[in-house]
Amino acid sequence: MRTVIHGGDVIAYHDGGHRLLRGGSLVYEDDRVVFVGRSYAGASDHRIDATGKLVIPGLVNLHCHATTEASGRLIADAGRRDFFHTGFLNYQSAPRGVTPLAARENLDIGNRFALVELLRNGCTTIVELGAVNDATVAFAGHIGIRAYLTPGYRSASYRVGPEGRLEYEWDEEAGMRGLERAKAFIGAHQGAHAGRIRGMLYPLQVDTCSPELFRATRKAADELGVGISTHVGQNLVEFHEMLRRHGKTPVELLDETGLLGPDTILGHCLMTTSHSLAALPGGRDLEILARSGSTVAHCPLVFARRGNALESFHRYRTAGVNVGLGTDTYPRDLVSEMRWASLLCKVVEHDFTVAAAADVFNAATLAGARALRRDDLGRLTPGAKADIVILDMQSLRIGPYRDPIKALVNCGTGDDVETVIVDGRTVVADGRVVGVDEEALRREAQQEAERLWATVPEWHWEGLTTEQLSPTAFPPLDMDLQ
């Protein structure tokens, strides 16, 4: 079926970059774009009036976690000071023999909730980090999202000793078994749902994987022809643990084990020798990253909440590092992440000219596609996949604008997404994911989160209650006011 989208501002791709086509037409047939131009006079089966709207390529989210995110929501404005700027260690670590909060979640509820949120906010392609199973693949196929999915694995788990000290519980054989399960998962699901589902190997964190597991991962990735993603440079605890353990920065260790390369995505990668908090002279981490061709998946909001920032989006790109964007935890709104990436970089660099709207938009589209080695994603040009997002630009919040991309980056949110098309199939219509009862799903996620929050005393090393660990913003009122 041939569909024409006409009358809107189209972000077209030409001669190696995005171009603004005002009042243009975009035509797609089946799963491919076939025409982009001023007007289209040919035959069509369906027409979409995009007047007053912005037509962009589907957003590529390089780093996200498919959960209800009850864990992360619990520690807003809270957490252990000795974990420095780290959030996840507060809920991914527990005493030996005790299941931490993050591992207690109903995977099915969390996966469905997150995948719907991602698609609803214009992310047509996602890289999900680790918490997936066969049901995740089936649901992703059902709603039509393009997803890189594989269960994660590691050699060690985070544990908390009797006095609260962070420890590592090692089981190298478990890590190798996890790699084998991931390989089998890829074999079972690679190319499912008309090719929208693909695999990627996920050794979960640089400090929980042995060098041997990283080398085995590189060997397996090369044999399978798939990419690799891991968490690295997340916090000072990890950075200095790797220096003590190996005498190398996390980036240096990954380089030595052969994990880095054009097929590797590094989640976060804040804490490198370029960061002011690292306090390590003579570093060359950015040089290593650029030389290897690896991609950094930058998730600015989640670290801003913990009082930290990449130093910086501009500096990495100037060094030659490919930098894409991800949402990590919540909210899963890549439109807003573009704004956070831009503003935080300007603040860090004390320079309002860096991380311009075009730069962060490119990161959410072209850089993401480059990381996945896909020249058919992240752009609207004949031959590219028909992954298209239409945004309503006629809201008071966006207001008057001259440049739709600057308006989107500075004023837009995922709520402005009106239509999402993946592989030529409309999967979001009138701001709602097709075939999903979003309100019922939200209620289900709320119930699951409340169940998880009630378990805090069961896994917290001091036995704190939920309110003790994470007090509400204001104290409760338990009396009538007259």
Image (cartoon, rainbow, N blue to C red):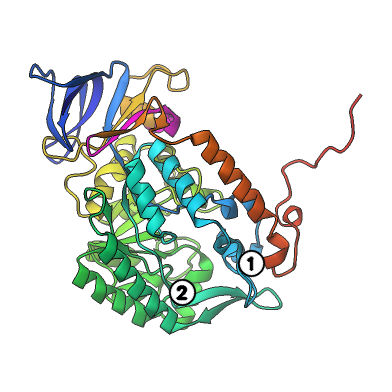
- The disc, 1 or 2, on the residue closer to the chain's N-terminal end is 1
Is 422 one of the magenta-colored residues?
yes
Q: Is residue 154 left or right of residue 188?
A: right
Instruction: Tell whether label 2 touches label 1 (CB within 8 Å).
Output: no
* Magenta stretch in the rendered image: 409-424
User: From the image, which quarter does the C terminus lie in?
Assistant: top right
> What kind of residue is marked 2?
Thr
Under circle 1, the secondary element is: helix
- Reading the image, the residue beneath label 2 is 208
Q: What residue is at 52 percent from the left and 54 percent from the top?
A: 308
In the picture shown, does residue 17 fall above or below 300? above
Q: Is residue 352 left or right of residue 34?
A: right
- Reading the image, the residue beneath label 1 is 82
Residue 380 seen from this side: yes
Q: Position of residue 186 (x, y in %)?
A: 28, 64
Q: Position of residue 161 (x, y in %)?
A: 66, 78
Residue 246 seen from this side: no
